[in-house]
Amino acid sequence: MKLSTVKDLDKEFHIAVYGERFFDKSFVSGDSVYLEDEEGSKYLDALGGIATNCLGYNHPEFNEALKEIIDGGVLHTSNLSYIPIQVEYAKNLSENLPMKQPKLFFCNSGAEAVSGAIKLASKNKGSVLISMENSFHGRYGDALSATGQGQYRKPFTKTLKQNVKFIPFNDENYLDSINDDVYGVLVEPIQGEGGIIIPDKEYFKILKEKCDDAQALLIADEVQTGFWRTGESFCMKHYGVEPDIIAMGKGIANGVPMGAFAVNEYADLFEPGEHASTFGGNYLACTAANATLNIILKETLGENSSKQGAYFLERLNELDNEQIRTVRGKGLMIGIEMDTPENKIKIIQDALKKGLIVGGAGKNVVRIEPPLIFSKADVDKAMDILSEVYDDL
């Protein structure tokens, strides 16, 4: 289908929440770390569907797992019956979580996972949820209520929780706000949509101590940072802190819609029947997620994320451009902070014209979150293009 036809149909039949797409492209095929548009042009993908396609495209082992479950004829039943692949995946995932004896709930997206995590935590004592300024947790439900960016919340004030208190991220002076009336503290290990903001190393240890003292549950939103995006299975491992709840999404199933949250001993706060999801943890989603996890471990993609991420940062820091304020990142979660929002947009658009896909975060940050299979040669190719783009800025 021609791009012009796609755009006409999109305008006629799709609610216009995405407006004119930021990338004026329609991708029709992919292989490894490359996407191809309807005209046959290829693009090096250094965004990975926004930290989602961690295995890239057309991975043979992942494809085979999906083909096998499709050929078996059962993609979905319901959670009224037991689902073998669901419990197999739960066991495999639990062995890679930074918490003791976790129990899991499977859903359909990161925002749903965060909302479920908040719902469970609200059964703890207290009436207040603390979240962080500049945070992003999702665009609906309790996840939106807890998002610390006013432009997302303001149009929907009537639907939002009113008992959410926002405090500055990475500032221990505000952690005394965690008192006996707080049932949970929701926080991203690295603020993603907010601009790839990395906290001080000791911040989370102090935060966890404050939560424990107040018996408030620490909820880690690892939707973007999880699944070896930062080199560790989950970013909280970098800080040596065990959260009480972890919300997951994005890279969990390599592009198949899925989310999850894991809970330590507080899992028993939920009674049978208090939470559910029609599609959550069905045969298709759990097959995709289990294959993704197994491939990441088999191909040591966490180690690759650390190695290539460090190399990417090294190469980015060689860029000599006065419009760059700073470069920061952990693993393959990287941000280039620009001097203005306009220059951020120009870099993204000019890179696309030259065959490289990168994204944006915050007001003025160029976001780089490629598939975890990104190689040194891929980094070099991306840097060849970025160097040209920055030279032309």
Image (tube, rainbow, N blue to C red):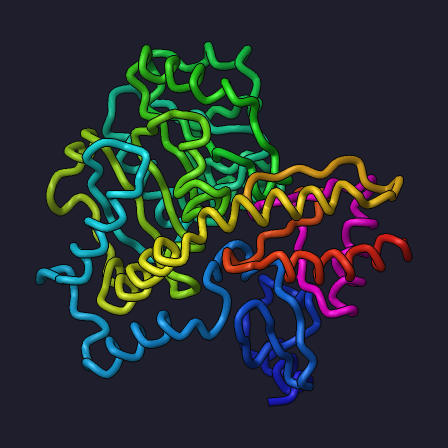
In front here: 80 or 207?
A: 207
Residue 139 position in % (x across, y down): 49, 49
In front here: 302 or 264?
A: 302
Is 384 within the magenta?
no
Answer with left or right where residue 245 lies relative to residue 30. left
Circle count? 0
Name the residue located 23 percent from the left edge and 83 percent from the top edge. Answer: 71
Answer with left or right where residue 312 lies relative to residue 110. right
Q: Quadrant of the N terminus?
A: bottom right
Can residue 142 be seen at all in this image of the molecule?
no
Name the residue located 83 percent from the left edge and 49 percent from the top edge. Answer: 343
The residue segment tinted magenta is 332-361
Above or below 180: residue 312: below
Of all residues, the one furthest to the bottom in this rendering is 1
**Image-quadrant location for residue 378:** bottom right
Above or below 351: residue 27: below
Can residue 51 be seen at all in this image of the molecule?
yes
Name the residue located 56 percent from the left edge and 39 percent from the top edge. Answer: 330
**Image-quadrant location for residue 338:** top right
Residue 187 position in % (x across, y down): 46, 31
Name the residue located 38 percent from the left edge and 42 percent from the top edge. Answer: 114
Answer with left or right where residue 98 lies relative to residue 224. left
Above or below 309: residue 180: above
Above or below 91: residue 149: above
Answer with left or right where residue 27 lies relative to residue 121. right
In front here: 290 or 159?
A: 290
Is 339 within the magenta?
yes
Residue 324 position in % (x across, y down): 81, 41
